[in-house]
Amino acid sequence: MENIIEVKDLCKTYITNKRQNHVLKNVSFNIRKGEMVGIMGPSGSGKSTLLYSVSGMDKATSGTVTLSGKEITNLSDKEMAAVRLDHMGFIFQQMYMMKNLTVLDNIILPAVQSKKLGETRSETEARGEELMKKLGIIDTADKDINEVSGGQLQRACIARSMINKPEIIFADEPTGALNRTSSNEVMDELVKINNDGATIMLVTHDAKVAARCTRVLYIVDGNIQGEYELGSQTDGEAELKKRERDLTNWLMEMGW
Ligand SMILES: Nc1ncnc2c1ncn2[C@@H]1O[C@H](COP(=O)(O)OP(=O)(O)O)[C@@H](O)[C@H]1O
Ligand SMILES: [Mg+2]
């Protein structure tokens, strides 16, 4: 499969109180089309920084990232914002939803802001509703976002991340604020959209969540220390349990 993302010698240095903090140190890796790559590692190891630097939410200090063969690390802020809007989807732990809009209006907002698909408002709304049906939250379409549960909100975030048909979805601890049941439901949805062809890069500290990825990268102190190939998606319960056990054993070897 072709690479959708190629990261080469990526460095990110923060300067705080005149001191340099080298958070990412020459990180290189690729993501193939259709993969669901989990990023794990100790707290403070640079997982979120990696996600933000690869997705252009934050500027890397040096190194290159290409998206579908096109370098994005040399784009202006405005060009990068357009690439993010049209070609990338984002899911975060605390999702930033607009409080004065309904759930449906929040979901379709990126499509309203983008010219990518050239739709009318009602076409966009119809697609938003379709995504909401798929994710089991159509009942919440006209609700305010403070009227829905955390699990429903997170599924709304998945719908929103998909509304512009992105090439890749970036997720930072998408289940971090959820209980186990909601977390499983949200992961079921992410696995489904991965099966439908979406490429996903996901940061998590939860081995159960990571076990649903197709590959896991382990990062320590700004370096990728190892990777673990889990293979294509499965929904068999016994198989999932085994995946989680195997991954946990590997993580222990990595010093997790
Ligand atoms: N915006 C920022 N400004 C300064 N330092 C930051 C910033 N974001 C993260 N850091 C530092 O970078 C390091 C890695 O943080 P982060 O990527 O959030 O780790 P993780 O997601 O693995 O827990 C930490 O030492 C953190 O303090
Ligand atoms: Mg983080």
Image (cartoon, rainbow, N blue to C red):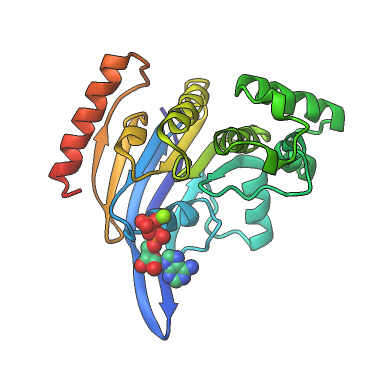
Disc tally is 0
> Position of 128 compared to 251: left or right?
right
- State the image coordinates of residue 92 (x, y, percent, origin top left): 53, 47
Q: Nearer the viewer, residue 145 or 229?
A: 145
Position of residue 125 relative to residue 23, above or below, is above
Residue 83 shows in this picture: yes
- State the image coordinates of residue 198 (x, y, percent, origin top left): 52, 29
Position of residue 174 relative to residue 77, above or below, is above
Residue positioned 57% across, 44% down in the render? 90
Residue extending furthest left?
Answer: 253
Image quadrant of ligand 2? bottom left
Q: Nearer the viewer, residue 242 or 170?
A: 242
The image quadrant where one finds the N terminus is: top left
- State the image coordinates of residue 236 (x, y, percent, origin top left): 33, 13
- Toward which corner of the image does residue 163 lie, by quadrant? top right
Position of residue 253 relative to residue 243, above or below, is below
- Toward which corner of the image does residue 206 lie, by quadrant? top left
- State the image coordinates of residue 158 (x, y, percent, origin top left): 58, 34
Residue positioned 77% across, 45% down in the render? 113
Residue positioned 37% across, 21% down in the render? 233
- Toward which corner of the image does residue 229 lie, by quadrant? top left
Residue 120 shows in this picture: no
